[in-house]
Image (cartoon, rainbow, N blue to C red):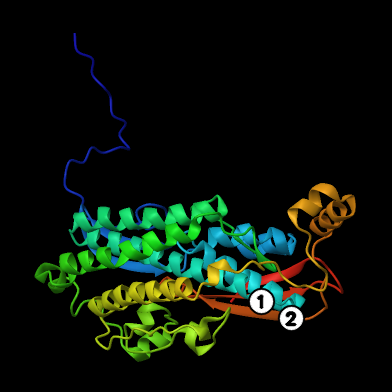
Amino acid sequence: MSATIDIPSQFEVVDRPLDTQMTISMGPQHPSTHGVLRLELVLDGEMVVKCTPDIGYLHTGMEKLFEYRKYQQGIVITDRMDYLNPLGNNLAYVMAVEKLLQIQIPERAQIIRVLFCELQRIASHLVWLATHALDLGAMTVFFYCFREREKIMNLIEAASGGRLTPSYFRVGGLMMDLPAGFERRIKQFQDDLPKALDEFDRLLTGNRIFQKRTQGVGYISAEDAIDWGLSGPSLRGSGVGLDIRRANPYTGYEKYDFEIPVEPDCDVWARYLVRMREMKESHKIVKQKRRAGCLHQIDWRAKAGARPFSRPELRKSFRAAAHVARRDDRGYRRDNRIDRYCAGGNRQIGLGSWAFDFRPFGHFSPFGRFSLL
């Protein structure tokens, strides 16, 4: 016996196609839009009628986190700002604090900082190249790029103990010196990278399918790039030859011989060529550091008014251990003034450089108001 269902009179059963449009949000969440982009979609059934990009979603509250932490505690937060360039963010932050505290950094520490920033730049560009090629249908390049990036991650892990968030740089120098055998590992990577870059060129640069999908696409004129605040490879791919490492040198970049890649075509193809050339220039900087014998120097700690304590001293001297514990507990002391520092990054749209601005709460306060400019 079948049961019948009585439908209330106020409801109507309609069995016809949807004839109205609906607006929904796509993002901002990972992995569809990587957490920084929202797409406002207008749908007519399953057909996308209109798509409006809404950029600017990177609300992590980092400025507020910085306000209530001591300077040495803020380093780990900078790693999370851009997980493809954590060491570059470390560098911009510690240089701002060092400028505020008027600390002079030893040459060896500066050399190692630049060495790791250039390695990080190559690793960041390899992730870009891998995902860029994958999105355009070239899957082989994806695996080859991550093969080379893994070598850089192993180098960073050997020095810092971390891979994605190393926090290797410290206010006044480095977390620790380079491990034994590090120069040999750098040389091995230095010898392998040019072969890999040539391999990428053969797979993509001369590929007619890749050319057709990048040339004349995504045109951004030099005027628009400046008006939109683009920086890094996106700016230089529009014919603007600005690189903060050359325009405002920091941590010894003025001592190295490297070119600033610039392409005039203003499209995706031009930005691809800029990044490919940048990896070669970063490799050139790494090679100059090894040939100069810089990794053999021994003085890597900062001169900040008081002599730093070595690890053997910390094990034997109660005074040394108490001094370090007191400094870590109370934070660094500074004058009541404002300082800022800017350093170059590896990314493209609006993430080419970081600037840290410190505004004090009170005289000799260990805390400061932080803003990301």
Name the residue rendered at 13%, 72% in the picture.
206
Q: Position of residue 219 (x, y in %)?
A: 26, 82
- Residue under pointer 2: 338
Q: Position of residue 287 (x, y in %)?
A: 41, 72
Characterize the local packing of mark 2: few (<14), some (14-19) or many (20 or more) Cα atoms within 10 angstroms: few
Q: Left or right of 132: which side holds 79?
A: right
The label number, if any, that marks residue 111 in the structure image: none
Instruction: Give the residue type that dot 1 points to.
Output: Asp
- Quadrant of image for the N terminus: top left
Q: Position of residue 253 (x, y in %)?
A: 52, 81
SS under mark 2: loop
- Quadrant of image for the C terminus: bottom right
Residue closest to the eye, 211 or 287: 287
Instruction: Give the residue type that dot 2 points to.
Output: Ile
- Residue under pointer 1: 357
Characterize the local packing of mark 1: few (<14), some (14-19) or many (20 or more) Cα atoms within 10 angstroms: some
- Quarter assignment of residue 229: bottom left
Q: Position of residue 10 (x, y in %)?
A: 33, 37
First-in-chain label (1 vs 2): 2
Residue closest to the eye, 102 or 265: 102
Residue at far left of view:
208
Disc 1 and disc 2 in contact, CB within 8 angstroms = yes
**Residue 23 visible in rendering:** no
Q: CA distance from mark 1 to mark 2?
A: 7 Å
Name the residue rendered at 37%, 52% in the picture.
31
As drawn, 327 above or below 257: above
Name the residue rendered at 62%, 75% in the picture.
107
- Quarter assignment of residue 75: bottom right
